[in-house]
Amino acid sequence: DIQMTQSPSSLSASVGDSVTITCRASQSLNNYLNWYQQKPGEAPKLLIYTASSLQSGVPSTFSGSGSGTDFTLTISSLQPEDFATYYCQQSYSPPFTFGPGTKVDI
Amino acid sequence: QVQLQESGPGLLKPSETLSLTCTVSDGSISHYYWSWIRQPPGKGLEYIGYIYNRGTTNYKPSLMSRVTISIDTSKSQFSLKLNSVTAADTAVYYCARGGQDDDRGRLDYWGQGALVTVSS
């Protein structure tokens, strides 16, 4: 299996801040890297696919970048509804493993 | 907009078989990959496996001996069976829609999740 790591595991931020979450894979993903947001009691929601493509309906304050094994998710201006846990996931090679998550709170 | 809904028993005893069904609302089941993911309480997401239209499957190696994913296109449903469950299988189980051929693992629609508890 491809192993995924994320950093930090948690962070505290304020409304309006810009935050960056890093994801690293144990091998190159050919940009098949996705980002999800999960709020308590809810299913995950796809934000970014193939490293940098914004899923329909997702605010443009979310952006993704990276290639190979190293990727980042940036939230440019944190809104109250953005406080959640964020997961990266590789869709390059099954099983399509997830990172351990990054919790963003106030 | 496609909707997915998991259904099945929420409480099992150790050694029993977990059986969940996911119903897809819009008739697109023949054209996408369909996945199961689980999340133990308070923990992260674990990818279980996927199925495609004619029964092509792929499973997480550590679960392969116990898991079966099947599909019934006539009912717009796909299912998960996990044998010989233990307390470690207690989790919220999600079904989700994957992409098409070139990005099977991109999960753009999810069910609400079904909590399955394994306890004697």
Image (cartoon, helix red, strand yellow):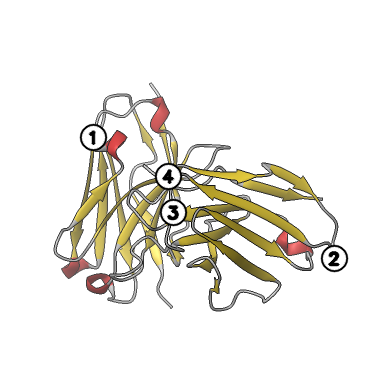
Tell me which numbered mark, 3 or 2, is placed earlier along the sequence: 2
Which residue in the protein does label 2 denote?
A16
What amino acid is labelled 2 in the image?
Gly
* Kind of residue sitting beneath label 4: Arg
Spatial distance from mark 1 to mark 3, Cα to Cα? 30 Å
Q: Which element carries disc 2, helix, strand or loop?
A: loop
Q: Is residue B44 depicted above or below A15 in this figure?
A: above
Precedes in sequence: disc 4 or disc 1: 4
Q: Residue at x 25, y 53 (%)?
A: B79
| Residues flagged by tags 4 and 3 on a common chain | no
Position of residue A19 relative to residue B75, above or below, is above
| Mark in the foreground, 1 or 3 | 3
Residue at horizontal 75%, vertical 58%? A19
Residue lying at 33% horizontally and 76% vertically, measured from the top left: B26
Label 4 to label 2: alpha-carbon separation = 33 Å
In-image side of A82 versus B39 (left or right): right
Name the residue rendered at 54%, 78% in the picture. A56
Whether discs 4 and 2 lie on one chain: the answer is no
Q: Mark 2 vs mark 1: tell me if same chain.
A: no
In the displayed image of the protein, which residue is found farthest to the top?
A: B120
Relative depth, front residue between A60 and B10: A60
Residue labelled with disc 3: A28
Disc 3 or disc 2, which is closer to the eye? 3
The answer to whether residue A85 is seen in the rendering is no
Counting the numbered discs, the total is 4
Q: Decide: marks 4, 1 in contact (CB < 8 A)?
A: no
Q: Is residue B84 visible?
A: yes
Residue contact at pointers 4 and 3, CB within 8 angstroms: no
**Viewer-nearest of discs 4 and 2:** 2
State the residue position of label 4.
B38
Residue type pointed to by label 1: Arg
